Amino acid sequence: MDAARKSASADASARMDSALNRSMMELLDHVEYRLIAGGEDQEAIYRLRYNSYRRSGMCGPIASGMFEDRWDNLPNAYRFGVYCYDQLVSTLRFHYITSAQPYSPSIDAYPEVLLPRLARGETFIDGTRFAADPASAPSPGVIPFLTLRIAMVASCYFGQDSVLTPVKMEHSAFYVRYFQAVQRTEGKAFPGVLPPLALFEIPAGENMRLTLKRLPFFRSTPLEQRLMFGNPAINRLTPLSIVPTAKFLLAAA
């Protein structure tokens, strides 16, 4: 009986993944990622952060109506806006962390976990300041996939040991289900936000390979990877808009 239930659950999960892959591949035709260097796009993502965080209780009132912090302009920082049908729907920031550049909010929040690993030569991508406008979503539930696809592109480019994702515990099931994330800490104070966040880690290597195989809309070409991460986010010469390339890889398969 247990085997039958497990088999039925696996079949249902495969059907859900198949439907998700179809809908996401179609949607990517209308998506672009913008590496934010400054100007109006920068103000737009800071306002989106603030509105999203106020709505969800992540921050208190800020007179400027914009949420920015001291990690935004570090040399290892990459800020992105996700645009669907030419409308900003979400934003995400990454820091690529090495022993030479050990700078990110998660390093400050969880030093006892991360600093010894950096000293051993491990590297990480730290994804923070995920914010979204649900009213702008082209369909229910797609914004997390559109946004976190950036983490998969980054992982293919940098080849780091794992992706760090500090999250509220009520959101953790999503990361475990789709990315096999592993919890590393209990919820604790996190810089810049009000609720406690727990550190989850998404291993790279074989785990990443299997995720890309199961969810091919996360795939990307080397060109897309270079456009996103080949230069620091503060480099204003970096191309502004990047088109997802997963469909080209699927067509070539």
Image: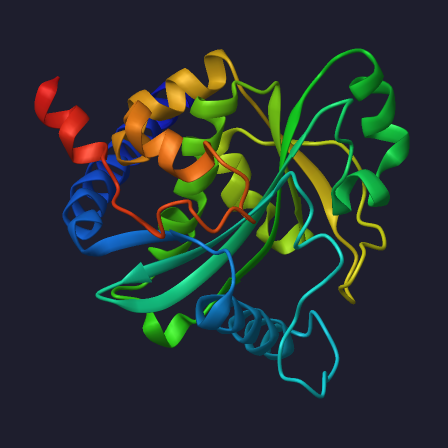
Say above or below: 76 vs 159: below
- Image coordinates of residue 179 in percent, x first then y, are 48, 32
Pick the front one: 223 or 109: 223
In the image, what residue occupies the spot 44% across and 62% down?
A: 90
- Image coordinates of residue 225 in percent, x first then y, are 37, 30
Instruction: Report whether residue 220 is seen.
Output: no
Q: Quadrant of residue 138?
A: bottom left
Pick the front one: 180 or 16: 180
In the image, what residue occupies the spot 81% across and 28% down?
A: 114
Say above or below: 230 vs 50: above
In the image, what residue occupies the spot 21% across and 65% down?
A: 85
Number of numbered discs overlaid on the protein picture: 0
Q: Residue furthest bottom?
A: 63
Say above or below: 217 vs 129: above
Pick the front one: 197 or 91: 91
- Image coordinates of residue 104 in percent, x first then y, are 74, 42
Q: Residue furthest front?
A: 237
